[in-house]
Each structure stands twice: as C-alpha cells, then as structure tokens.
C-alpha cells in the first residue's frame, strides 16, 4: 500500500480583490500517494494553479488543511516550512529560466542557494545535464535553446536538490506535439527511476492519457471526479469528465443516428467496453457465429492507456428479444462492460 504524500482535507481558498471575494477552491479533498503521477485537469479558471500553489505553500488555504507527508502546513514554523519546500521541485509552462545566465548556472541556482561548494555543484549539475541529455549545452544561454531544451533545463533545475515531489504547471502547454511527448516520457522516466511523486496540472486530456496513473477533474473550484485513469476513461461519471474523455476518445454517435436506431425495433444499441485481455479476444466474432442475432457495428475505437488496451464499440443488435437477451448475457460473461447508447 502506497503512503499518502499530499493530502487536501476539506480545503477552500477564497481570494478577496477590491472588496469582492471569489471562491477559487471549494471544499477539495484529495490524496496523492508516493510514486503517483497524478494529473489535475480542468478548464481555464477551474482552480488548478491555486491547488498547485497550495502544495508548496505559495498560497495558504482559507479553510481546511494541506498535509505533506502527514505534516500540516498550517501553523508550522518557518524553518519546518522551508524544509518541506526543499523537498518539492517545480517546473513551469514558460520555463522561468534566467536568460542572462548559462544553462549550467540556471541548473546550479538551487544548489548555490543551499550554499553547496563549487566541486559538489559542478558534479551534480554535470550529472543532471547528462540525465536530461543537454551536456553539450552547458555553456549555452536559454535564448539559444528550443522550447523542449528549455523545459529540460527547467527539469534539471527542479531535480537539483533531490526533491521527492515534482509539481508541473502546464509544463507542456507551450510545446509542439512531438516535443510534448518527449518531455512527458522524460517525466515518466524520472518517476520510474527515482520514485518521485509527480503532480501535473493540464487542460489537455491527451497529457493525462499518456502518463498519469490517477487524475482529478476540476470545475468551478471543485474536484468533480477523481480516480484511476483507466477507470475514469472507461466510465466517466461526471459530464465535465465525459467531455474531457471525448476530446481524446471519440465514442459517441451523432444524436440523429441514435434517434434513428432507437426507432428500429426490435433491436438494441449498446456501447461495449473492452479492457486489457478482453480487447484482444474474438468476442464479437463468436457472438455473430453462435447467436441467431444480427450485429451491426456502428463504431469502433481502440486506445492505449497506461499500457492497457481500452476498446470501445457501438453495436446495434437485432433479432428476437430472447436471442438479444442471450447475446447480451454472453457479452457480459465474456467480461465486456455494456451500457445503453
Ligand atoms: N491572487 C488571486 N486573486 C484573485 N483571484 C485569483 C487569484 N488567483 C486566482 N484567482 C482566481 O481564481 C480562479 C482560479 O484560478 P486558477 O489560476 O487556479 O485557475 P486555473 O484552473 O489554473 O486556470 P488557468 O488554466 O487559466 O491557469 C480564477 O477565477 C482566478 O481569476
């Protein structure tokens, strides 16, 4: 059982500006475990950045409690707080590098601030630059680098002090799709190799699909749904989640088509979900061969999430009511998740 590393207990955050107050976070409860890659997704203004800023205490909650490794950040001494913050690295959408300093110096900054000696800094920075594949750019300036290279400098700097938590604030939003994948793979490698817990905020479900184990979906300051990525992609419960999932997995028929199918009786239009092994077996083939029903495949799609195959199919099954029922029982027994269209 993984240890909880970050916990939000009934956290609310109200901002007051010019006498008007705004509830940016509304009673958020969240647990992020050691070694998770945890995604927080939501539209602009949903409260994602505020949530992230509460983890490293750049903001304090108005109500509730944020705990890091079981230590509440509210009311602890400045010394203790600095200790906690040292354990948290952060990367940013626009990289936040010092343009007047070399790549080497940018990565060295956290170590200089810690008062490390020159030999230690040289060794550690060289090691980090090798890890992010930028050894040959040590003496370059940020302006001479591509976006992806700048983000790799940002990652090396964030890792300099060996944090156990890495916060990523829209870390790939300024990058093209190819570079995005490279940076996400690097984050995955950091998580696997060093066991660092990663919290990643994004407005793109494709980012969550590629590397997150768990996800929280935010809307209007609330976490409307959270859980395992595979389950959430398969069966989103909240409408906000469903629309994010549909941005990467298209599994809906046009409404007119659904209406037409529903008029054609006796038949049933079903949405079938195949996960893992079930997605690799000839289940529908067997259904067609062994049951006296007609199967019209209206739609099919397959995705890979966390190395697991997730397949969707929308079928129209026609025939005698008893035969349709028997066919549905067969699908159910074969491990297919079934819902009405
Ligand atoms: N310091 C502040 N003072 C007043 N209001 C704020 C402050 N910080 C954030 N807000 C408000 O809180 C809400 C949530 O903001 P937040 O930046 O957390 O959302 P977000 O989901 O990260 O959005 P985006 O994706 O656009 O960055 C917004 O309506 C924002 O205007």
Image: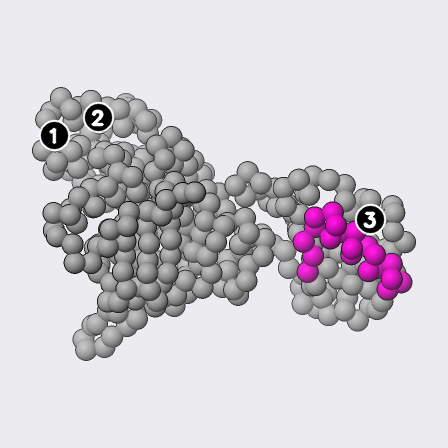
Residue 139: which quarter of the image? top left
Q: Quadrant of the N terminus?
A: top left
Q: Residue 116 has which mark?
A: 1
Residue toward you, 22 or 231: 231
Q: In terms of secondary structure, what is the magenta stretch mainly?
A: helix
Give the x, y percent position of residue 74. Answer: 20, 58
264 displayed left or right of 183: right
**Magenta-tinted stretch:** 320-339
CA distance separating discs 3 and 2: 60 Å
Whole-number angstrom distance, CA of label 3 to CA of label 1: 68 Å
Question: Do callouts 3 and 1 mark residues in contact (Cβ within 8 Å)?
Answer: no
**Secondary element at image label 1:** loop
Of helix, strand and loop, which one carries label 2?
Answer: helix
Magenta highlight on residue 338: yes
Residue on which the image places disc 2 = 124
The residue that mark 3 highlights is 287
Which image quarter: residue 35? top left
Residue 251 screen position, x and y as percent: 63, 56
Q: Examine the rendering and report whether any part of residue 120 can be seen.
A: yes
In the displayed structure, would residue 151 be above or below residue 331?
Answer: above
């Amino acid at each position: 059982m993984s240890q909880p590393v970050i916990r939000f207990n009934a956290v609310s955050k109200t901002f007051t500006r010019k006498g008007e107050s705004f509830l940016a976070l509304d009673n958020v409860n969240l647990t992020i475990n050691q070694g998770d890659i945890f995604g927080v997704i939501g539209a602009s203004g949903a409260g994602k950045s505020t949530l992230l800023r509460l983890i490293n205490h750049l903001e304090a909650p108005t109500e509730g409690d944020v705990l890091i490794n079981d230590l509440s950040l509210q009311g602890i001494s400045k010394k203790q707080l600095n200790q906690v913050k040292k354990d948290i690295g952060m990367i940013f959408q626009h990289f936040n590098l010092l343009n007047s300093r070399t790549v080497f110096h940018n990565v060295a900054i956290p170590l200089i601030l810690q008062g490390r000696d020159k030999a230690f800094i040289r060794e550690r920075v060289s090691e980090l630059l090798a890890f992010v594949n930028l050894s040959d750019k040590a003496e370059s300036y940020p302006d001479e680098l591509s976006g992806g290279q700048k983000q790799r400098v940002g990652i090396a700097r964030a890792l300099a002090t060996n944090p156990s938590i890495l916060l990523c604030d829209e870390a790939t939003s300024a990058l093209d799709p190819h570079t995005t994948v490279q940076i996400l793979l690097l984050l995955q490698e950091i998580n696997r190799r060093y066991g660092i817990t990663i919290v990643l905020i994004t407005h793109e479900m494709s980012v969550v699909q590629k590397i997150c184990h768990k996800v929280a979906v935010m809307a209007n300051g609330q976490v409307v749904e959270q859980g395992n990525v595979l389950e959430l992609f398969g069966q989103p419960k909240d409408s906000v989640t469903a629309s994010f999932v549909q941005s990467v997995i298209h599994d809906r028929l046009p409404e007119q088509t659904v209406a037409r199918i529903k008029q054609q009786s006796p038949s049933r239009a079903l949405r079938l979900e195949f996960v893992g092994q079930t997605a690799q077996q000839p289940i529908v083939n067997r259904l067609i061969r062994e049951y006296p029903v007609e199967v019209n495949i209206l739609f099919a799609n397959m995705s890979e999430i966390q190395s697991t195959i997730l397949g969707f199919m929308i079928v129209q099954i026609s025939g005698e009511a008893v035969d349709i029922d028997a066919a549905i029982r067969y699908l159910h027994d074969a491990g297919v998740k079934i819902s009405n269209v």
